[in-house]
Amino acid sequence: MSAPDAARQLEAFLQRVPYVRFLGMRAELSGEAMTAILPFAPHLVGNTMIPALHGGVIGAFLEATALAQLSVTQGSARVHKTIDITIEYLRPGRAQTTYARAELRKVGRRVANVHVEAWQEARETPVAFLRGHFLLSSD
Amino acid sequence: MAVDLDLIRQMGQHMATTVPQAAALGFRFVSVERARGVLEVPWREDLVGDPDTEVIAGGVVTSLLDHVCGLAVSAAADTVPFGTATLDLRIDYMRPAAPRAGVTAEAHCYKVTRSIAFVRAEAWDADKADLIATAQGAFVVNRG
């Protein structure tokens, strides 16, 4: 896919999915490599004492990153369907911006295997990982 | 001696309504008993994950399952409710929820060691016998 097409697919995904807007997720593209960005917002907090992002928010952000990367690479306007995900939490997500990159480990005819990692200050100290399988929708 | 269920109930209501992310998603406390909890999230337009079908987003279900698992862990405490942090969470999506349907989730904390709690959870839209998702998680427990 050409770079403008990839950018258009990504923009369509970010704009069309209401829940992505609810999270406040954004993304930047360099070729087909996408970095997802989740700016901190008070409604994302799960623990007000630390304060820390809700574990579900981190999982949802990682899942949305996988879906966004698939929409960029696969070029379908349809949202692909999650089959299963495993989220591993390494550190609390602090009250600051979170980043994520997805790696498509295998894209088959019907199913894709995707790994995603999220970090805050530095990529060397990840906050969480996601591994998942996604059922690919065709137009 | 098991932890007072009234206390857990209060905490469950508190967890569903005052945690910012839970309040933002509109979680509702349904019930709690020893080592078990039930929460629900009503459908809302801004929580849709697929604009073509108006089905609620998987991410909302993820948050609900994580939250209800935390509630079940807290409700498994012997005396003071535990604080919890998610170590890992695995979710299987059997099918999408029905268009414009809310989701209910129930979790059971079936084992607690000194440091770790093990939890299973299920989510459905209309019928508990026809699940949309199941979850399995491990949580670090912080004994108050």
Image (cartoon, grey):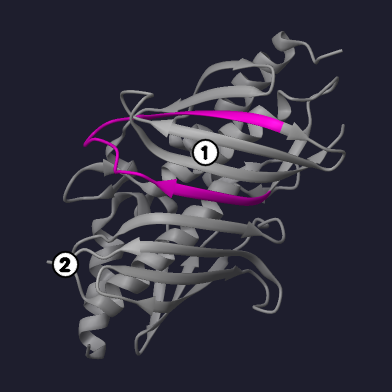
Say if B69 sits above or below A124 in the image.
above
**Can residue A89 be seen by looking at this rendering?**
yes
Q: How many marks?
A: 2
Q: Which residues are magenta?
A: B87-110
The chain identifier of the residue carrying mark 1 reads B
Q: Residue at x 46, y 63 (%)?
A: A132
Drawn side of residue A129 relative to residue B61, left or right = right
Q: Position of residue A119 (x, y in %)?
A: 62, 70
Q: Which chain hosts label 2? A: A
Q: In the picture shown, does residue B75 fall above or below A88?
A: above
Q: CA distance from mark 2 to mark 1?
A: 29 Å
Residue on which disc 2 sits: A138
**Residue at point 67%, 73% (across, down):** A121
Indicate the quadrant containing the N terminus of chain B: top left, top right, bottom left or bottom right.
Answer: top right
Image spot of residue B130 (x, y percent): 33, 30
User: Three-letter amino acid code at disc 2?
Assistant: Ser
| Image quarter in which the C terminus of chain B is found | top right
Give the residue at mark 1: B65
Q: Is residue A13 left or right of residue B91?
A: left
Q: Are marks 2 and 1 in contact (CB under 8 Å)?
A: no
Amino acid type, label 1: Leu
Estimate the x, y position of residue A129 in percent, counting from the top left: 59, 65
Residue A10 position (above or below residue A128): below
